[in-house]
Image (cartoon, coloured by chain):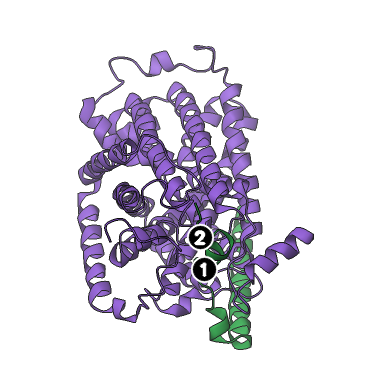
Chain colours: A purple, B green
């Protein structure tokens, strides 16, 4: 009770102002990041096997893991300093400039809203597949997923991420249970990796198949950078954000490796690359009804956790745009009782519903991945500028990532490879999105920016950057 | 059972959406726009951490 009162006092320290509540800890940051991502182990990553074979799926698991480890390290350093809602948007605003920030915020909103849509479609389709009832459609399940989770987000961030922690943990534990249930230390009893992945079929399309597999390899970890959106709601951003993000990344690397090993040892790559439910199918193939039902429920929980985190993050990015008047300030309202960006949550709700009802899963996933990779490309440039403008020792950092500039260079190079992979599979969508961001940038530069209060948007009490 | 669950999902969606719309209306008519949009970025950072090396 005392702690709750103290928290309330610190958030109303500026008189009558209504701000977001600082109530979260490192476990909530972990739940937000891993919750958004874990659905990628239950569906998505396996399409990389279709592009390049089972071995390509393993290669991208590690190489894309390197990409995301760079993302997590870079993000942890910058966000432990720029602790504001909006995450990478606030980083871009302070380090690069307003036009970049506007674009980054749109990348965030698109990436998370489209991922939320994909999660809801997945959940609906999974229930329909399980039911096998004539005339049953996924629409009601999609609507319930999006509306119930929006309601949860509307009612407060603490309960939202407590729920996310529990359901993410259950989904994660189900992967661990599956892994140990199939005697991973023994080949031939249940697992047949040496029969299913042979030198003849390991890379059926050669190394170009490995490059093409990057597009869906992103799904192993897509969204871990979402932890930064909680920056304004964690009690100790400089400690909790790096800790939660890095712990989340380690968790996901382990889950990705276990998932690949079990699935590639139970299914031929031709099937693994096209199924929508690799882990649920793996549960079925063990012959255990208990595992089958556990993995079915875990698939639903993973989709729920991901959609829940996405609503949280997209709303905060949209809210931040409103607060800086990059969009109408109407969106920057905070609920006086629940202390959530309630108008942003409500505004994005019908948009997600509309896309979920009219878009198909592949389109939604591709738009989400594209926006995510655009954001990671920005992050590699952002950290170079950050270290140059504010070198070590000039401002206090909660975390300093090692080996700079190596992670930034690795990140940039892997993003370029991923763009090429996306171009191979979805070239027209890539071009359409690039044109969209170009046009919206023109609108922002020539029309919207005149409404922005230029002095107010740079809020961090930093010294002048070097060279200025 | 599954068809029944589907109808329950529609029902829950409608009820919760209506509740959020009602609450939105109530909040917007109870508090001033100035109060609702009074949040500012970085203020806590400025007060609690001050960025001293």
As rendered, which of A179 and A220 lies closer to the eye? A220
Evaluate whether residue A127 shows in this view: no
Q: Quadrant of residue A334?
A: bottom right
- Determine whether label 2 and label 1 are within 8 Å by CB: yes
Tell me the tag on residue A345. Answer: 1
Q: Going by the image, does A384 lie left or right of A253?
A: left
Residue at the disc numbered 2: A311
Label 2 Cα neighbours within 10 Å, binned few <14 / some 14-19 / many ≥20: many
Question: In x, y percent, where is residue A106?
Answer: 35, 63
- Quadrant where the C terminus of chain A lies? bottom left
Q: In the displayed structure, would residue A458 be above or below residue A231?
A: below
Count of labels in the image:
2
Say yes or no: labels 2 and 1 on the same chain: yes
Label 1 Cα neighbours within 10 Å, binned few <14 / some 14-19 / many ≥20: many
As rendered, which of B53 and A216 lies closer to the eye? B53
Q: What residue is shown at x 55% (from left), y 53% (from top)?
A: A237
Q: In the displayed structure, would residue A140 be above or below residue A243?
A: below
Q: Chain of mark 1?
A: A
In this view, which residue lies farthest toward the front? B53
Q: What residue is shown at x 27% (from left), y 16% (from top)?
A: A200
Q: What residue is shown at x 46% (from left), y 56% (from top)?
A: A116
Question: In x, y percent, where is residue A80?
Answer: 49, 51
Helix, strand or loop at mark 2: helix
- Quadrant where the N terminus of chain A lies? bottom right
Helix, strand or loop at mark 1: helix
């Amino acid at each position: 009770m005392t702690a709750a009162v103290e928290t309330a006092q610190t958030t109303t320290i500026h008189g009558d102002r209504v701000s977001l509540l600082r109530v979260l800890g490192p476990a909530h940051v972990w739940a937000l990041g891993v919750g958004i991502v874990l659905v990628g182990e239950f569906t998505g990553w396996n399409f990389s096997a279709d592009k390049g074979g089972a071995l390509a799926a393993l290669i991208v698991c590690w190489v894309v893991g390197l990409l995301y480890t760079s993302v997590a390290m870079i993000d942890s350093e910058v966000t432990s300093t720029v602790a504001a809602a909006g995450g990478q948007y606030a980083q871009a605003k302070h380090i690069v400039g307003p036009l970049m920030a506007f674009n980054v915020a749109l990348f965030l909103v698109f990436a998370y809203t489209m991922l939320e849509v994909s999660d809801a479609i997945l959940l609906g389709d999974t229930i329909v597949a399980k039911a096998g009832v004539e005339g049953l459609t996924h629409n009601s399940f999609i609507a319930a997923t999006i509306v119930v989770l929006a309601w949860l987000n509307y009612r407060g961030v603490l309960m939202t991420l407590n729920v996310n922690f529990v359901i993410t943990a259950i989904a994660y534990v189900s992967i661990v249970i599956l892994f140990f249930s199939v005697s991973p230390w023994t080949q031939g009893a249940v697992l047949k990796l040496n029969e299913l992945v042979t030198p003849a079929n390991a890379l059926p399309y050669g190394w170009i198949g490995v490059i093409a597999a990057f597009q869906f390899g992103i799904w192993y970890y897509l969204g871990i950078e979402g932890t930064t959106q909680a920056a304004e709601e964690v009690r100790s951003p400089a400690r909790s954000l790096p800790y939660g993000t890095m712990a989340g990344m380690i968790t996901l690397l382990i889950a990705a490796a276990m998932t690949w090993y079990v699935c590639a040892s139970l299914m031929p790559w031709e099937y693994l690359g096209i199924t929508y439910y690799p882990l649920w199918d793996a549960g079925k193939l063990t012959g255990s009804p208990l595992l089958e039902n556990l993995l079915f429920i875990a698939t639903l929980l993973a989709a729920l956790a991901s959609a829940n985190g996405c609503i949280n993050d997209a709303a905060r990015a949209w809210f931040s745009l409103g607060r800086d008047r990059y969009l109408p300030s109407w969106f920057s309202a905070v609920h006086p009782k629940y202390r959530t960006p309630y108008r942003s949550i409500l505004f994005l709700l019908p948009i997600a519903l509309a896309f979920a009802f009219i878009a198909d899963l592949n389109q939604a996933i591709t738009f989400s991945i594209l926006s995510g990779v655009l954001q990671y490309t920005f992050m590699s440039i952002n950290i170079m500028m950050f270290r140059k403008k504010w070198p070590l020792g000039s401002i206090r950092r909660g975390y300093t990532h090692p080996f700079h500039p190596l992670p930034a260079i690795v990140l940039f190079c892997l993003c370029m490879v991923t763009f090429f992979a996306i171009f191979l599979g979805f070239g027209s969508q890539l071009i359409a999105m690039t044109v969209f961001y170009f046009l919206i940038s023109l609108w922002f530069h020539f029309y919207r920016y005149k409404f922005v209060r230029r002095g107010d948007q740079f809020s961090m009490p930093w010294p002048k950057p070097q060279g200025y | 059972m599954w068809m029944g669950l589907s109808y329950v999902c529609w029902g829950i969606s409608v009820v919760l959406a209506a509740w959020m719309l009602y609450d939105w209306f109530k909040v917007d008519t109870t508090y001033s726009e100035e109060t609702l949009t009074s949040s500012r970025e970085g203020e806590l950072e400025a007060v609690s951490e001050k960025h001293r090396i």
